Image: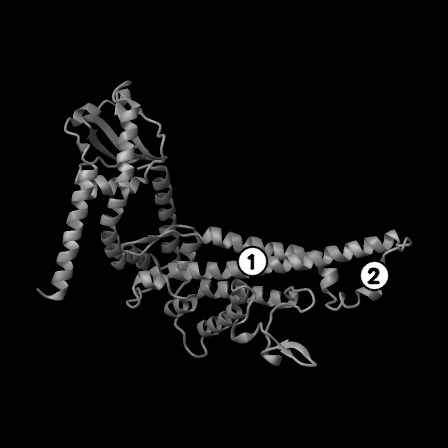
Amino acid sequence: MPKDERRQATLDQKTSDLNHRLRLRLKPFSPETEIARWNDRSNVRSVEFKNSAPPPYIVFLMFVYFLKFRYWGRSEKVAWEIPVLFQGQPLLLRHQKFGFQILCLGPKLPDEALVQRALNTINKAIPLTEKLAEPLLLQKVNEGRMTLRNDFPNLYDRYSFFRSRYIERRSESAGASANPFLLETAADTIPIRFEGESNFSSESSVSLEAFNAKIRAMQESSHYAVAAIDAFFSLLEHILVLLAAFLDELPAKPSLAQFIGLNWDQKFMLVFDIKNGSKAKFFCDQLRIFKERYRNFFTHGNLQKGGGSILVHVDAVGAIPFTLTRFDNPFHPLFRHLECTELDEIFKFFDSVEDFIENAPESRYGYKFIRTGLSVAFDVQSREQYKVAMGSDSEFDSFIDRHIYFADQAINMDW
């Protein structure tokens, strides 16, 4: 037998064994046969769970995909229902608007203890269901039959929050940051109180307090700026992944799952046409510089690559930078803060990056869709719909409006 056939035979046998074990685990369950008894819902009750409820999708896979139980489709505020018998007692497994639910017939039978045992049996079968589902899900992902949650609103809000707080605290520290040598000359400008002195004026105390407050504001503005820079690159990477769904063709290599795991600049080069002298190449190159100098430096414990953070002990000189004059620490040496003028240029550049993505031919429609917060689907049918809608601005706006309407319906289960 060829190697590929042996591998497939092994996988088939493993799947068969898992399916057999799942059936044994769920042996107390059997398909409901007297469907008519559920027609009258006036005498139906739900049981409050003592243990955590399983995710509805796991229950559906468990009973419908693998055990082949029948189910009922959508109804008002309900996604699906699976009529079952547990130890001979009729139950209805249901995914409703607020999660998974088990319904019983009648006010007394079955008792709540039996329902809890049914729930425990389902929970114990989850690991087997997950193992059975893994190859199925992987195959669908490799085929592009997937959706990614769009977290743009949350990521953009985080970036905006840290950036606005940087601006606020920078304004409060303007008096101190205007003179970068203030700390060196503090002894000349602010009276210092020595031990035993009693003539330390309240005016001096207020001046020193105001100075310390400005220094603290300067340091905090720097902290917010670091957080904003990190948030921007997280936002950028999220956008680049979602933009792939709006390209003429998805990247053949790597696969879509591998594309998600690429570095941000690799994603950038697959989404945009990087040519010498192009805007896309300019932005990509500049983003690399900013990411290496700032985000990577702060993310990796304020340590530079290539020995940039090492101070070498040299006799009669002291500890000097290993990289000598090439030492590139973004912090101001006195206050350990980032310079405001430099930060303002960084955020101005980030604005130009956003403007580029918003208007570039490869991304302008995709970015408009992403800004809505709607989830992005990567299957062939959905991507074809995106492509058709990108024929004109008005058509794409109508397309977005329809998707928002359908998304609201799905959230509220208003079928």
Mark 1, secondary structure of its residue: helix
Q: Position of residue 240 (x, y in %)?
A: 41, 62
The answer to whether residue 171 is visible is: no
Q: Position of residue 79 (x, y in %)?
A: 29, 37
Residue at 30% over, 24% down: 112
Q: Secondary structure under badge 2?
A: loop
- Residue 227's quadrant in the figure? bottom right
Name the residue type under label 1. Answer: Ala
What residue do we see at 46% from left, 71% from top? Answer: 284
- Residue closest to the eye, 25 or 204: 25
Q: Which residue is mark 1?
A: 227
Does the image show residue 404? yes
Depth check, front residue: 338 or 306: 306
Residue that mark 2 sits on: 190
What colouring style does the render use?
one colour
Residue drawn 66% across the image and 68% down it: 332
Give 296 or 16, whichever is nearer the viewer.
16
The residue at the point 57 percent across, 64 percent down is 347
Toward which corner of the image does residue 384 lie, by quadrant?
bottom left
Instruction: Tell me if 135 is positioned left or right of 243 in this view.
Output: left
Q: How many other residues sit within 10 Å of disc 2, few (<14), some (14-19) or many (≥20)? A: some
Q: Are marks 2 and 1 in contact (CB under 8 Å)?
A: no
Which is closer to the viewer, label 2 or label 1? 2
Residue toward you, 259 or 89: 89
